[in-house]
Image (spheres, rainbow, N blue to C red):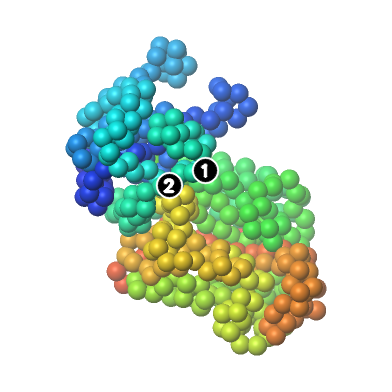
Amino acid sequence: MFSKDTYIARRAKLKQTIGSGLLLFLGNDESGMNYADNTYHFRQDSTFLYFFGLPYAGLSAIIDIDNDREIIFGDELTIDAIVWMGIQPTLKEKSEAAGIKEVRPFKEIEAYLKNAQQKGQQIHYLPTYRAEHQLKLFAWLGVMPGAEQPSVPFILGVVNQRNYKSAEEIAEIEKACVVTADMHLAAMRTVRPGIRESDVAAVVAETAYKHNYELSFPTIATVNGQTLHNHDHSHLIKPGDMLLLDAGAETEMGYAGDMSSTIPADKKFSQRQRDVYDIQVAAHEAAVAALRPGIKFVDVYEKSCAVIMEGMKSLGFAKGDPMEAVKAGAHAMFMPCGLGHMMGLDVHDMENLGEVYVGYNGQPKSTQFGRKSLRLGRELEPGFVLTIEPGIYFIPELIDLWRSENKFTEFLNYDKLETYKDFSGIRNEEDYLITENGARLLGKKIPLHAEDVEKEHC
């Protein structure tokens, strides 16, 4: 945890922003994999962590602005729990570390909320992403599952604090990024023909666990990089393959790193692989060079996509004006995803609160294929932490579909695309802090250029 003064200040700012009412924070519970005592790895709700810092299951909290009360609701450990889990600080001691003086038994939260309802007090809650949260809202407030009406002022209040990373948060994210880089370096030294994707995933996980860190998301380690989020690790790596690795570490305090790299199975990229890889690197570097306060991230995205289309035109895959192709949406043949996303306590920071608020400052998102997957479009500001991860993918099913529809024939050469259906996909990803004058890489640099990847790989 940070010092209790950090959490006190965060809550004070939120109370000032919202002004009145009652703020309900739903902590997470343990979740059984196949029976109650065999649980998934516990991860506390990120907003609960941000304002209270307590990484323990079975807690919820209330900030009652109108009555100037801040309360943690939970239960003390019984002797049965202590036998299995060991002794821990009391709930009061845990809460005092976050600057909370009032703790109540968990069962009392229902009565507190219903009393507030009866008095006509406005109760604010955030969007749910777990069934347990929906059931609690139903039991405590009578809100039917699926009929939730999250508080927009509460959402905006949280987003407008969490989007701007403090110096102590940046230091914690940097720790995650350093270990994340080590995970990718370990993978580069491991990949070779004859091993399985699972061998690479194991080395990546080991590197994180050595630091007592968790994975910030399930590792992608695949020779089928054309599937953007491929979590299968069963394939044998063969000569001529490329392995796409997307992996990150999460610190003990819950802050994330997120990086990607593309590694040849052989000692060097083939010429065919290198031609496309170099275009992806150029798109990556164009995006990084554009990062600065005041620029809209959607403009950075378009610059990067235009570099991809220019490069693909040089290889005979595309034609016409590259930026016109991007505006029309033809670039999504190669990059049907976004360029990056906010990062912090969530690897996709606050995605559960709504991309329209986090990444677009309340403005509507595009519905265009490819562009609609851009999680961040707003004007960049100092304190934002984000990823840069352009990619180039050859997706056979997308090639077939668009060809059958005669889609973007003025921009795409389908005969050439047919010959690359076996290529798979590539991406590289780094994490950046927007500064007063530009942007700064977080963590240490992992190899990006083909020759540097090959050197580390060998």
Distance from disc 2 to disc 1, alpha carbons, whole Å, reads 9 Å
Q: Is residue 180 above or below residue 321?
A: above
In depth, the one of 401 and 322 nearer the eye is 401
**In the figure, is residue 258 to the left or right of 34?**
left
Q: Residue at x 56, y 41 (%)?
A: 206
Q: Quadrant of the N terminus?
A: top left
Three-letter amino acid code at disc 2? Gln
Tag 1: amino acid: Gly
Q: Is residue 436 left or right of residue 290?
A: left
Q: Give how far across and how far down residue 453 sits, in percent.
A: 59, 63
Q: Identify the mark at residue 442; answer none if there is no mark.
A: none
Looking at this view, is 310 or 10 the one in front? 10
Vertical comparison of 302 with 118: above or below: below
- Measured as percent of width and height from the top left, residue 304 is found at 53, 75
**Label 1 Cα neighbours within 10 Å, binned few <14 / some 14-19 / many ≥20:** few
Q: Which residue is mark 1?
A: 146
